[in-house]
Amino acid sequence: MRFEAKYAGRLSAMIYTSVSLAAALAFFLVTLLTSDYTWVARLGGSAWIFLLSMIILMPTVTPWLRRRLGG
C-alpha cells in the first residue's frame, strides 16, 4: 500500500504510538516475569515508559517519514 506525503502525519502517529505501546508492554512483561514489583509499580512504570517514548518519538518519526515519503 502506497502512502502519499499528505498522510505522513497520520502514518507517523500510528508508528510512534505502536512503538510506544510495544515498549510499555515489554516493560510490563519483563517486570511481571522477572521481579517482585507491585502492580502499581508495574502499571506506573509502563505508563511512564509509554509517555517518555511518545515524547521522544513524536518529533523524530514525523520528519523522518515526511522526508522518506518525499513531502
Image (tube, grey):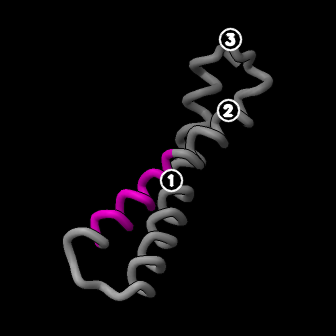
Q: Residue 34, image x and y in percent?
A: 20, 71
- Can you tell which mark lies on residue 20? 1
* On-image quarter of the N terminus: top right
Nearer to us in this view, 58 or 30: 30
Task: For marks 3 and 1, give the CA distance.
Answer: 24 Å
Q: Residue 23, image x and y in percent?
A: 42, 55
Q: Give the residue drawn at x 55%, y 56%.
A: 54
Nearer to us in this view, 48 or 34: 34
For label 3, the SS is loop
Task: For marks 2 and 3, give the CA distance.
Answer: 11 Å
- Residue 13 on the magenta span: no
To which residue does mark 2 refer?
A: 11
Instruction: Tell me which numbered mark, 2 or 3, is placed earlier along the sequence.
Output: 3
To which residue does mark 3 refer?
A: 2
Q: Answer above or below: position of 34 versus 18.
A: below
Q: Residue 66, image x and y in percent?
A: 64, 25
